[in-house]
Image (cartoon, rainbow, N blue to C red):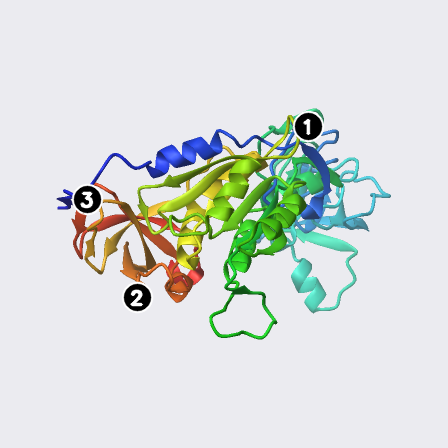
Amino acid sequence: MTTKNPNFSENMLSVEEARENILNMMFVLNTEYLPISDCLGQVLSEDISSIIHVPPWNNSAMDGFAVIANDTKRASENTPVKLTVIDSVYAGDMPSSKVSPNTAIRIMTGAPIPDGANAVVPFEQTNEIQQKANKQHLETIDILKPVKENDYIRFRGEDIKSGDNIFKKGTILRPSEIGVLATLGFKEIPVIRKPKIAIISTGNELTDLGEPIKLGKIYDANTYSIASSVEKYGGTPIIIGIAKDNEESLNDLLDKALDYDILVTSAGVSKGDYDIVKNILSQRGNIEFWSVNMKPAKPIAFGWINKSENEKLPLLGLPGNPVSAMVAFEQFVRPSILKLKGYTKLDKPSIHAILKNTIKNEDGRRMYIRVLVKKEGVDYYAEATGNQGSHVLTSMAKANGLAVCPENVLEIKSGQKIEVQMIDWHVDDL
């Protein structure tokens, strides 16, 4: 049984309230036509109807012989029916002969059914294999089992008929949907365009990758973890650069971000950060700096930068600590990207797992604990991935989920179940 948390306070903004405020400013983007090979994970912006039948003609469901079913009605292994083989037809070819009584045409899977035939006898129900083994020329074939009319025939339009509405607007394109669209001959698909996400890191201490590291400096990790997360969820990351803690540097980079759909920044949102960052953002738009009731990632900035009199660029300011930035990304940036793409289901996939470590929530905030989830028998188990400090990025690298301890719960003990938001599923986890 979980223990109620006496430190829980309702004064801070909840995760749900913060997310709702953010998503209220996100709107589905416009349509673009993409090559079908670039559409995985995209959302249809229009209904799709077929202009052809699938299959386009009656064709064979098996390798075998196209026959008249009535000719086979007395066939058995002891008293086979002998038919004359008059031709062969392969997938991609059209039949050049017609099946008449007591004749058969050798046919491959997918090949059109010849005129006159109304069934197919699979090779396994003939002496085809035996004749081939004896290197006999197929002038006749023994039918060892009767077939009924229409057996082993796939009929024109059986799967899809011309004019059928195949996919509705809003359908997410998985490999199976893309396969269907390719079957229908679509080369380009109308989809909601990918969001372009501008990324700026802030801080005098940051050094870009490839540069020599100096005393007191650190490499810029957040830009690249954020960029890869944007790509993971179907956006296009646009790395703008590192802003120094001065007005001119930040203004220059903000100018370069105005053409994109969302601006994501990291650092510069905590109480102890340079006021210049907050001041500039406030001057150029409307920025709110929140304390969200969560751990890690309590400080969050949200608002917009004015692009023009009528256009606004949504801004999400993430904390500077790497883990805090990644947790905040999952809770707020990820659903924003998905909404821009036209997704309607924005919650992260979650499971319930049995805890291997007791969790204590002494702050009264919603805790996101980095855990490794594994299946043992029929149950999932979640184990913390070491030091949970917001600066310990390796704890995130080892995790495949975020265990969620509600803000009003003081303790969840080892052996109890907890909700886990899954970050990644791997074969080894199942």
Q: Type of residue at label 2?
A: Gly
Choose between 301 and 420: the one closer to the eye: 301
Relative to 335, 159 lies left or right: right
Mark 3 burial class by Cα count in 10 Å: few <14, some 14-19, many 20+: many
Mark 1 burial class by Cα count in 10 Å: few <14, some 14-19, many 20+: some
Relative to 374, 27 lies left or right: right
Q: Type of residue at label 3?
A: Val
**Residue pointed to by mark 1:** 49
Q: Where is residue 71 in the image (x, y as percent from the top left)?
A: 68, 40
Choose between 85 and 175: the one closer to the eye: 175
Choose between 80 and 243: the one closer to the eye: 243
Label located before the other in sequence (2 or 1):
1
Label located before the other in sequence (1 or 3):
1
Give me the disc on residue 300: none
Q: Is mark 1 on a helix, strand or loop?
A: strand
Q: Alpha carbon of mark 2 to alpha carbon of mark 1: how far? A: 52 Å
**Residue pointed to by mark 3:** 409
Q: Type of residue at label 1?
A: Ser
Quarter placement of the C terminus:
bottom left
Q: Where is residue 355 in the image (x, y as percent from the top left)?
A: 23, 56
Residue at (37, 49) in percent of width and height: 297
Nearer mark to the viewer, of 2 and 1: 2
**Residue pointed to by mark 2:** 386
Residue 195 versus residue 122 in the image, above or below: above
Residue at (63, 30) in percent of width and height: 311
Q: Is mark 2 on a helix, strand or loop?
A: loop
Residue 422 versus residue 372 in the image, above or below: above
Q: Do the residues labelled 3 and 2 touch (CB within 8 Å)?
A: no
Nearer mark to the viewer, of 1 and 3: 3
Q: Do the residues labelled 2 and 1 touch (CB within 8 Å)?
A: no
Q: Are marks 1 and 3 in contact (CB under 8 Å)?
A: no
